[in-house]
Image (cartoon, grey):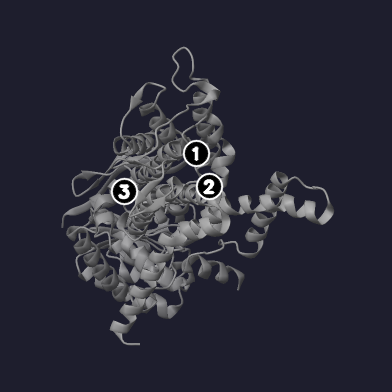
């Protein structure tokens, strides 16, 4: 298996707080890679450095041989890494459909002149974006809410809309920050199905999640962070028996 | 209603609307006098300005308090190139686009240093830029007399269209159109163009990206939007419309001075947008017309007071500002989305209340 994402020696400090120290890991194409750890371990910080929201202090991030570290977020996205946010960040005042259409921005090109004159190329592009956006809403199961404002959707639907928006950018790697947070059991199992389908379609997933059962069942491999340090990496079986992981995160809960 | 009947009624409404727009200056001339037609011309300029600022504030969510700088720039470019000040008398079709383009360029130049600022901080810096331009115009009469200082530039050429000047009456088929009527049609044409461009942009890839930036800049960037370029584009587009309106203003008034471009002017244009309905084209147009025409109507209150009480208790000019303040507070309290909000914002505010 070839590595799609390679993170080598990435460090990030906020003043005196070392949020990430020397993180090295690699995500293979086609797998679901889990990132777990207690609150404040640095999982979201790692996401933010991966997606260009934070600059790294040291280290290198490679996606498909493209350097991603210290590049602006829109370039990271264009290189093929899309993400969702832990505290849902939708465009609240736009409809669900428009939210997904914004996701098409990086893969479309029409500018001011095309928009004002409605050039044939622009019209084709718009029609294509609409079709794709509707198909994506269908896929995550919220097509019936296409014309509703994002802020009026239920919590679970908002999470799904965020995934649809990220998928619209045609990523090769999709990073999900706690996608199951706040979902009820039925929504969770629907999400699980969706993620497995996406994997089957050849998408690689990077997943931060606190639902240990979901993570252990879904992920091919896991990395565990604690105080900004990677304390374990491997298959769910190996990681869940690791004494360091049990001490830091899992506790004595039997799995 | 069948589809064809529906289409027919749509065309009928459109036709009636076009005819009433065409007849409007004559109706107003007959009922209220020529000075109101002149005011209508001015109101059209403010519609243009408000629509330009609406791109920056309403769509992209960038609170710009120095918008009048671009209006001033367009006006001065027109005055420099078509007045005895430098002895240049270029035709309007060359100057207007030049002034608009130059204003657009300045939109980018002034926008660039503010890219990292948001909300209040952006407002303060743009306010500063607006004042800087005005103070420059006020003081650039030495060592080289560029702007003629506070005296301003006089005798600016009116727009000449195919031999007819927009400041002179024109006889067509035995009927005489006055200058203000001709100006009305010319401005109306340009305003319709600006409305058309705004509408097309609103429902486009670019317009969606602007709204996305307004809604959540970080999410917009993480969704692949180059926020720097799109914010600059919004500044440039808004400034272009401002520059165009400025050039028209200079040609219309025949005289400009820095006094026409003070901070109050920026705030008024912003008020038009907020009062009418931010980000919603019909609302913005309504706000611009209301805030240009209403203060003039309030001038009559002086006469009423004299008739009622025998003397004037409140100076009409003061009353205007007072009523203005009350109206703004009332709108913010009872119609926070503006007088004609977009369906979307109406829904949002209704939800917030529920």
Alpha carbons under labels 1 and 3: distance apart: 32 Å
Alpha carbons under labels 2 and 1: distance apart: 8 Å
Q: Residues within 10 Å of mark 3 (few under 14, many from 20)?
A: many
Name the mark nearer the viewer: 1 or 3: 1
Q: Which residue is mark 1?
A: B68
In percent of width and height, residue B42 lies at: 49, 47
Q: Residues within 10 Å of mark 1 (few under 14, many from 20)?
A: many
Please, which chain is the residue tagged with disc 2 on?
A: B
Q: Are marks 1 and 3 in contact (CB under 8 Å)?
A: no
In terms of image quadrants, where is residue A128? bottom left
**Relative side of B350 to B329, left or right:** left
Q: Secondary structure at mark 3?
A: helix
In percent of width and height, residue B83 lies at: 40, 27
**Relative side of A42 to B306, left or right:** left
**Above or below A184: residue A174:** above
User: Which residue occupies the foreground of this view, B162 or A138?
Assistant: B162
In percent of width and height, residue B168 lies at: 41, 41
Q: Residue at x 41, y 80 (%)?
A: A186
Name the mark nearer the viewer: 2 or 3: 2
Q: Residue at x 34, y 76 (%)?
A: A143
Q: Are marks 2 and 1 in contact (CB under 8 Å)?
A: yes
**Above or below A232: residue A21:** above
Q: Residue furthest left?
A: A1
Q: Secondary structure at mark 1?
A: helix
Are the numbered discs 2 and 3 placed on the same chain, yes or no?
A: no
Q: Which residue is mark 2?
A: B269
Q: Secondary structure at mark 2?
A: helix
**Above or below A192: residue B3:** below
Mark drawn on residue A74: 3
Q: Is residue A181 visible?
A: no
């Amino acid at each position: 298996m070839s590595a799609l994402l390679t993170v080598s020696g990435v460090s990030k400090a906020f003043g005196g707080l070392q949020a990430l120290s020397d993180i090295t890991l690699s995500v293979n194409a086609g797998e679901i890679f889990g990132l777990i750890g207690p609150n404040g371990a640095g999982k979201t910080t790692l996401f933010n450095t991966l997606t260009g929201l934070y600059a790294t202090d040291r280290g290198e991030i490679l996606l498909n041989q493209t350097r991603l570290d210290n590049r602006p977020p829109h370039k990271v996205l264009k290189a093929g890494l899309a993400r969702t946010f832990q505290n849902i960040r939708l465009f609240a005042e736009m409809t669900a459909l428009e939210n997904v259409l914004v996701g098409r921005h990086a893969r479309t090109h029409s500018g001011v002149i095309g928009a004002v004159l409605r050039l044939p190329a622009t019209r084709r592009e718009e029609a294509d974006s609409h079709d794709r956006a509707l198909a994506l809403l269908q896929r995550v199961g919220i097509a019936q809410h296409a014309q509703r404002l994002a802020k009026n959707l239920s919590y679970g639907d908002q999470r799904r809309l965020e995934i649809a928006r990220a998928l619209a950018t045609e990523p090769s790697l999709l990073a999900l920050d706690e996608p199951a947070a706040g979902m009820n059991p039925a929504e969770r199992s629907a999400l699980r199905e969706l993620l497995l389908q996406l994997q089957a379609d050849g998408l690689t997933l990077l997943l931060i999640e606190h639902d240990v059962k979901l993570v252990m069942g879904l992920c091919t491999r896991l990395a565990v962070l604690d105080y900004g340090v990677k304390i374990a990496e491997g298959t769910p079986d190996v990681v869940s028996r690791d004494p360091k992981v049990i001490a830091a995160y899992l506790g004595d809960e039997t799995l | 209603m069948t589809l064809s009947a529906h289409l027919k009624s749509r065309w009928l409404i459109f036709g009636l609307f076009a005819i009433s727009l065409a007849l409007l200056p004559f109706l107003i001339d007959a009922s209220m006098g020529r000075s109101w037609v002149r005011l209508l011309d001015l109101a059209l300029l403010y519609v243009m300005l408000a629509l330009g600022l609406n791109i920056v504030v309403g769509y992209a969510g960038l609170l710009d308090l120095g918008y009048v700088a671009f209006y001033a720039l367009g006006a001065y470019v027109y005055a420099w190139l078509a007045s005895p000040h430098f002895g240049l008398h270029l035709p309007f079709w060359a100057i207007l686009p030049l002034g608009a383009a130059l204003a657009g360029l300045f939109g980018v130049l002034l926008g660039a240093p503010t890219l990292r600022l948001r909300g209040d901080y952006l407002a303060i810096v743009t306010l500063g830029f607006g004042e800087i331009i005005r103070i420059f115009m006020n003081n650039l009469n030495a060592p080289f007399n560029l702007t003629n200082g506070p005296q301003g530039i006089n005798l600016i050429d009116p727009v000449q269209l195919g031999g007819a000047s927009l400041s002179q009456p024109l006889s067509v088929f035995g009927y005489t159109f006055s200058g203000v009527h001709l100006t009305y049609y010319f401005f109306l044409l340009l305003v319709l163009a600006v409305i058309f461009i705004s509408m097309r942009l609103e429902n486009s890839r670019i317009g969606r990206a602007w709204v996305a930036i307004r809604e959540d800049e970080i999410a917009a960037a993480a969704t692949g939007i180059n926020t720097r370029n799109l914010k600059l584009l919004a500044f440039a587009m808004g400034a272009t419309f401002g520059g165009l309106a400025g050039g028209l203003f200079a040609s219309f008034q025949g005289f400009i001075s820095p006094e026409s471009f003070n901070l109050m002017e920026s705030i008024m244009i912003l008020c038009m947008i907020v009062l009418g309905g931010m980000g919603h084209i019909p609302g913005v147009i309504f706000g611009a017309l209301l805030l240009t025409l209403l203060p003039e109507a309030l001038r009559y209150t002086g006469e009423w007071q004299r008739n009622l009480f025998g003397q004037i208790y409140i100076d009409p000019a003061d009353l205007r500002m007072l009523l203005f303040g009350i109206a703004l507070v009332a709108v913010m309290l009872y119609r926070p989305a503006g007088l004609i909000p977009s369906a979307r914002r109406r829904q949002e505010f209704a939800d917030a209340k529920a």
